[in-house]
Amino acid sequence: MLLRVRVTLPDRPGTLGQVARTLGVSGADIVQVVVLERLGGRAVDDFTVVWPGVARVERLLAGLAAIPGVRVDGVWRAIGAPTTTGQDAELLAQVAANPADGLATLVDAVPGLLAADWSVAAMVPVDWASRTGGGGATVGHASWRTPVPPMLPEVTPLRARSMTAPDGGHFAVAPFGRAGLVLVVSREHSETLTPAAFHSTEVDRLAQLVRACAVILGDRLDLVGAPPVSAKP
């Protein structure tokens, strides 16, 4: 299976090589490395690896923990192919080419782009600010892996951010800026795998995609969740 492994490590020569060798010795086949952050002598790297399904992830974690200064932030199953340059532009092109299904196209594609489990376009009531405890969001469109019903986080106030649920799952949310629509992306915690929280660069990427789609789709977003208009007899 395809795994995403997030590691925080000292930003010095040789450490990245140690991590890569440990992954290989443990049985992981590295297919991609993405540097999310380099700050204050530390780096945060995402490794996408092919992992033999019969092997125990504990072996991988033990090997990485033995490297001085290395911390494993999360290991979780990656959905879809590794991230490549141009995927975001290709997605926006698909949305622009078929705006009638643009929101569904975005919602279905985002989990693969962000190594998440599912995503939904949630609708927040227009009077959410005056409600006690915020507004209760409802689902306008859901990706194919979304549980029924999805356990949505409190998405108000409407701003792009990441959050963690009490059960250890993680969310990233980004508002469209109209119609009370918010895109919610989820990484679920499981008994065997513990995902990392959404990094600030991932939240920024999600927010940029959502803002671009809002410009492309325009008034179509106001119709999300609206009852169909029946033809007059």
Image: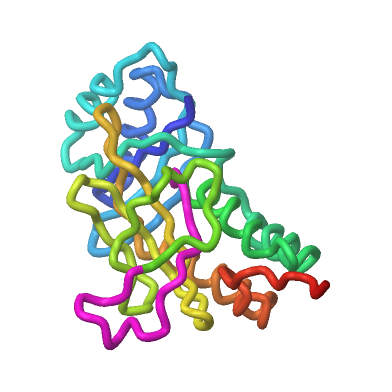
Q: Is residue 187 left or right of residue 164?
A: right
Q: Is residue 129 left or right of residue 78?
A: left
Work out whether residue 6 or residue 159 is closer to the camera in this orientation and state it.
159
Q: Is residue 72 left or right of residue 17?
A: left
Number of numbered labels in the structure image: 0
Residue situated furthest top in the rendering: 54
Provide residue 37's location: percent of width, then percent of height: 35, 59
Boundaries of the magenta span? 116-136
The residue at 49%/41% (across/down) is 145
Provide residue 39's location: percent of width, then percent of height: 28, 63
Quadrant for residue 141, please give it: bottom right
Quarter of the image with the C terminus in it: bottom right
The residue at 54%/49% (across/down) is 143
Quadrant for residue 18, please give it: top left
Residue situated furthest front in the rendering: 233
The residue at 16%/37% (across/down) is 68
Was residue 203 drawn as part of the magenta stretch in this picture?
Answer: no
Identify whether 28 is placed above or below 176. Answer: above
Identify whether 137 is placed above or below 141. Answer: below
Work out whether residue 50 or residue 116 is closer to the camera in this orientation and state it.
116
Identify whether 91 is placed above or below 67. Answer: below
The residue at 32%/34% (across/down) is 19
Provide residue 159's location: percent of width, then percent of height: 37, 77
Was residue 125 drawn as part of the magenta stretch in this picture?
Answer: yes
Identify whether 184 is placed above or below 187. Answer: below
Provide residue 47's location: percent of width, then percent of height: 42, 39
Work out whether residue 163 or residue 7 is closer to the camera in this orientation and state it.
163
